[in-house]
Image: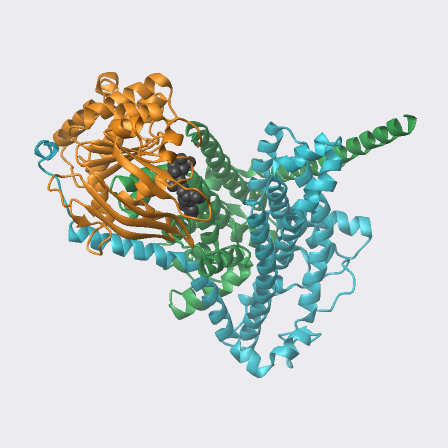
Amino acid sequence: MVTAASGSFELDDVSVTYGNETAVAGVTMSIEPASVTALIGPSGCGKSTLLRCLNRMNDELGNVKVGGRILFDGVDIYDRSVDPVELRVRVGQVFQKPNPFPMSIFDNVAYGPRTHGVRRKAELDALVEESLKRAALWEEVKNSLKKHAFELSGGQQQRLCIARALATSPEVLLMDEPASALDPISTQQIEDTIAELKSSVTIVIVTHNMQQAARISDRTAFMLRESMDFPAQLVEVGDTRVMFTNPADKRTEAYITGRFG
Amino acid sequence: MTDASFPRRRTGRPAFRRAAESVVTRAIAFSGIAAIVILAAITVFLGMNALRAVGDVGLWSMITGTDWFPTSKEPSYGFLPAIVGSLWVTAVALVVSVPVGVAAAIYISEFASRRTKEVAKSVIEFMAAVPSVVLGLMGLAVLVPSIRVLMRLDTGLTAFAAGIMVGVMALPTIISISEDAMHAVPADLRTGSLALGNTRWQTVHKVVLPAASSGVFAAVMLGVGRAIGETMVVLMLAGNSGIVPNTPLVSVRTMPGTIAGEMAEVVQGGEHYSVLFAMALVLFAMTFIINLVADVVLENQRKRWRR
Amino acid sequence: MNHASARVRRARTVEMLARAVTGAAAFGVLGVVAFILGYILYRGAGSIDWEFLTAPPRMFMTQGGIWPAIYGTLLLTFWTAVFAIPVGIMAGIYLAEYAPKGAFTRVIRLAIANMAGVPSIVYGLFGLALFVLTVGFGRSVIAGALTLACLTLPVIITATEEALLQVPQDLRQASLALGATRLRTVLRIVIPAAAPGIVTGSILGLSRAAGETAPILVTAVAFYSPVPRTVFDETMALPYHLYIMATQAVKPAPDVVWGTALVLVAGVSIINVVAAAWRTRQRRRIRW
Ligand SMILES: Nc1ncnc2c1ncn2[C@@H]1O[C@H](COP(=O)(O)OP(=O)(O)OP(=O)(O)O)[C@@H](O)[C@H]1O
Ligand SMILES: [Mg+2]
């Protein structure tokens, strides 16, 4: 199945090998555009590993091999003709710990556009404002854009990182436990932001929080590594409501109801 | 819809930027091997200039020759006076700097308060920057006259005087590397020992020193390397006589002192000139081996505590 | 019971003794540094005046000033920086950001560590053979500066690498994930964050080069020369001037000797203290 809409992924028998240890194998699933897909599973089951395949950040770790095929809007992103740098403009990422650059709020958001050749002040101003608005941070910082990013609170820093990722207008946003380092109120704000964003951006989010997955995602993928001797696998993927009410696999049910993991 | 609001979106990097990036990246990689290139160039250029001496005098007869009379009618170019002189100076330097340096490192690493530690470390860092010619001058003004009077010698310009000052020069190396080695010993080992009822000192000599021993050894080796290669202090304080010394209380010549003292006065391309290059090559080889041993030991030590 | 407390008492005594002995060593070393500085200040302060700092020598160097030597040292250090800093920083970047883990990188690291221990006179002869004779610069500022640059390189490389490794991995990832290339990430994110360490390390390395005598002895300096007009002229320099005046002066001129020593030491000290203080301040400001 090939979708025409922008911001979709097709994973076909994807496996990831670190050195000589295969961490993830046989993942086949699709990620639909303009929706939120949650990746859940116990610690060490390869959620982050799989996520990093989608913007080829695994390439930067060295000694990592990705097998199978990953099509992004129909194009194999591991094809030799694809420049990972260009891919990452279209597939942004937000990390677990807020990691703003040591520079002003404005410069943080403008970093991506500047990297890709936007120089005109007016254009940058517009981009920064729009991105901060989409990340629901604009009202709080509009009068202090020159402030150092480290002066913001943790939750604000994380929304700044979201704004920074949005500034290159990616079609997909990968989020690896974006709220796990934050307090409940900041978490709520991040979730609201995600809800706002999903009409325009495909979101793939890793989370350990079942309620969060249930609240914000349209589809959920459950991964599991049953033993360190074998690679992790995709147990089940499907509509979130179905999966949380009526999972097809016993192991999914056990995990969701908190019986292991 | 987002694309509509960002009309100037680019999909490719311009070719000139890619080209510029690959040039800079290549320059970076090339700079990375600069150290290897320079070390190789040192070997080649010293070797080329030493060729004539090796041909005329012979490497072995230089290294084992006991007379250094380069300017007499029948010149003799024996390195032994300089090699043995360098060893005496180094021995004195080690006697001064190893006990003091290691003890100071123990204090700074294990006993000193945070504030003292910070101050001491910056003073030691600064000490390494005091020019050696200044220490040579201090030696001439303070040390040499006192040694002459105290030891009732004809001259204070001796291996002993040079050795003490060279020891002072080697102190920063020995202190900072040993201190690093002790600092790298994981804190759990220390707290474990203290929890067993050991005093701080017992912890130091039962746990910290054994764990840091290879680092301390490397520090001493690097100190030896510094001492053998130190030039200005020995040139100014050792006296530069031509005999093979059998005590540190006489005037001696050293390899660095000989090279530095005579290089300016020799005929370029002449035999004496070439012999000095051969001596530099011997000196380079000695320090190279000493430093290599120390660095390998240090690297292994670092790896040990990494996980 | 009695037995145990005797053992404890003995341990306590040994502890005190160890603390006293090692403390004496540490403070003894600090004392030596203080003595050297104090002594040079005491002997040299009297000879420093405006003329001494700005005039050329007179009366066979026994009177007048040392301006040509000061200028020569500044010039040598400047050109050393020009040659050593770009290569040193790039090599540091290579090691911290690009070098693959493996045997070859290990060899590079060993070579850099080893370079730091090569005797300065060996650098001098190397410079003589390569820059003075083979390249044909003759005894000149440029030959001396290139020689000093070789000697300073390992210090700058090591300082750069250490400073870069302090920068959290997160920042690199964030930049790469925004579609920045590795090079842009290094130039725009990592280097600015590591700048305090790189700058201080380079300055400390250069201040050491400024005090070196042996490498310039055979590559750059002259006993007496006017202020060099171009980098291809030979020059006077403070450390060499001090060496000559202390050991081979025609007539003893203690004022010039100690004055020169004070200028040299004061220059090196001020640079070191300022650089170290700046680094401490920057470190406090940026806490990851
Ligand atoms: N850089 C790496 N090098 C080698 N092995 C790695 C690396 N990163 C992850 N792994 C291995 O891959 C497996 C999956 O790790 P991953 O971080 O993807 O799990 P995760 O599901 O994100 O876990 P968590 O929920 O704790 O974040 C683990 O066994 C881990 O040891
Ligand atoms: Mg993870």
Residue B99, x across and y down, in percent = 73, 46
Quadrant position of ligand 2: top left
Residue B67 rendering spot, x and y as whole percentages: 70, 74
Q: Quadrant of residue B196?
A: top right
Which residue does the image show at 31% across and 57% down from the upper left?
Answer: B26
Percent x, y of residue C240: 52, 53
Nearer to me, C243 or B108:
B108
Horizontal relation, residue A81 to residue A27: left or right: left
- Which of the 4 quarters of the picture holds residue C120? bottom right
The front one of B172 and A82 is A82
Q: Colour of chain B?
A: cyan
Q: Reply above or below: B282 against C94.
A: below
The C terminus of chain C: image quadrant: top left
Q: Residue at the spot x=22%, y=16% of the render?
A: A139
**Can residue B262 be seen in the rendering of this structure?**
no
* Foreground residue among C233 and B203: B203
Q: Is residue C260 left or right of residue A14?
A: right
The tint of chain C in the picture is: green
Specify whether residue A258 is in view. Answer: yes
Viewer-nearest residue: C88 or B83 = C88
Rendering colour (chain A): orange
